[in-house]
Amino acid sequence: MKGNWIWVLALTGIVLSGLSAADKKQERDLEEHFKKWLEQDVLYIITAEEKSVFKNLTTPEEKQNFIDQFWRRRDPTPENAYNEFKEEYYRRIQYANERFASGIPGWKTDRGMTYIKFGPPDRTESHPTGGHYQRMSWEGGGSTSTYPFERWEYRYIAGVGQDIELEFVDDTLSGEYRLTMNPDDKDALLRMPGGGLTDAEMMGMASRVDRIVKKTSPMPGHNPLLIGYGRAKDQPFEKLQLLTNIQRPPEIQFRDLRAVVTTEVKFSQLPVEVQTHSFRIREDQYLVPVTVGVENKVLQYKGLGDILRAELQIYGRLTSVTGRVAQEFEDLLASDFRKEEFQRLVQGRSIYQKLLHLEPGRYKLDLVIKDVASTQVGTAQSLIVVQRIPTEDMALSSVILADRIDSQVDSRSAQGQFMLGDVKVYPNTRAEFAKDRDLLLYFQVYNLGVDQATRSPSGEIVYKVLSGERELVRLTQPIRELEAADGKVSVVQAIPMAELQPGSYRLRVEVQDFILSRNASREESFKLP
């Protein structure tokens, strides 16, 4: 389904300065953090393709965005903020370090690797001191003495198989158990002549050479009366295949994202910013603008005469919490700059918007954006929560922090993207604003009381800019000055920021209804670089 998108250029300034000592230390710390994440935290579960992409990323922002997407692809419940997979994974690392350390960290040991990748076994057999051991029938029977060992059994491991049996042997008596595919590795008497014989060896019907290939039936050149005792899964090639499967990263199990994983793995090559807002049309339908921002400097432009053009392909999919696809959309976008303007405009950002009409509920939005010229791909996921606003409750819509609001809209552009009521609102997807410009706001207030005499609402809106709990800016706006329709008021306001210093702030909007003695409030965060 083709969507109608629009390209809008937002200019931002750039400040170039040398790195201070503190900045350089922070840069080194970040590099160490990313190196540890790749070489330790996710060593056992990251795929070769993901590792290759991550190593080619250059900026901390790209790497952090990749890490965020890495965990989201493995999240069994992406519709909520809690990632069960990630939490369980780091719990396993902690457990491995506490239980399996042996002169090296627990996560580096074979038991640690197995536990981190596949979790606790369904059954464990432990022989922490070794000693006398009566072999199982499929091991040939007979008794011997063993090194310390453990046997872990899994009923099923995705991507590996069923009825998995792993043995870990401490043949150095150092506390480090190594994974072995040969059940005789735990036999401490293996190299002692006449020691630890199997039943068949004691009867002279087999030799230790026969342990290499466990006979499952009489074989040519062997005693036809000897009944084979080996299991099929104990044969050398089956063991080798099991070892190969164990070494692979676990499969990504959540198939609903499988279709976009091959694109999503390249995510951080093209950083993408996404904002969503919600405005009531009626009680069972809401307008949800989805705004996407991309920095122009990360796009690749091609010359077309006096014009430089970048083209983007966009695909979006909206799914409900039950996995039902609610909407899909796609489009091809183009951005044109005149060559003489390019050096100035390329430092800005471009934003796009898709207007969705949704019922109340929770939705997951997946976006994939591709730069046609460079083939770089960006992905983003957002949780969209559309809350029902009952007609008896006063409430505020989302508050948009905007770069630009056009109130005098040409009739030819009075439809489509960025259009809210009779104004066009262009959100700032990074929530970063220049100090020499006002902070522009747009929001709606619902279910205000109406004075029966004047047929108008009565109340006030208070705007506060806060740093921590300290109030730095305060503006008051009477509601009677605003035009109301069916108990709804649309508000456009400008907040001066000239007196604010660079830093992070919170904007609080408080609405008081004098007629019904009700109030409501919203907060948004923003920065002055």
Image (tube, helix red, strand yellow):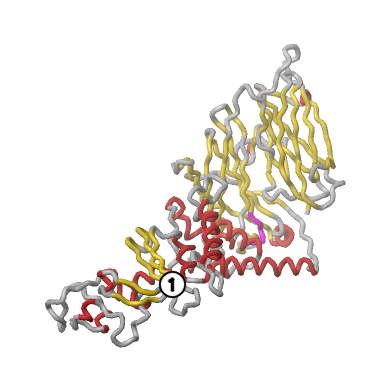
Does residue 51 appear in this view? no
Image point (77%, 43%), residue name: 439
Q: Nearer the viewer, residue 306 or 9?
A: 9
Magenta-span inclusion, residue 296: yes
Does residue 27 appear in this view? yes
Image point (12%, 78%), residue name: 224
Quadrant of the rendered image containing residue 201: bottom left
Q: Residue furthest front?
A: 132
- Dominant SS type (magenta): helix
Disc 1 crowd, CA 10 A, few/some/many (<14, 14-19, 20+): few
Quadrant of the rendered image containing residue 411: top right
Quadrant of the rendered image containing residue 288: top right
Q: Residue furthest top?
A: 453
Mark 1 — residue?
A: 129
* Residue 47, percent from left and from top: 48, 66
* Residue 344, percent from left and from top: 74, 59
Q: In this view, does 432 lie above or below 521?
A: below
* Residue 334, percent from left and from top: 59, 54
Residue 88 placement, left or right of 520: left
- Kind of residue at disc 1: Thr
Give the extent of the magenta segment: 294-298
Q: Which of 267 and 385 is in front in this view?
A: 385
Residue 248 placement, left or right of 163: right
* Residue 360, percent from left and from top: 54, 33
Residue 46 placement, left or right of 401: left
Residue 445 placement, left or right of 327: right
Magenta-span inclusion, residue 238: no
Label 1 secondary element = loop
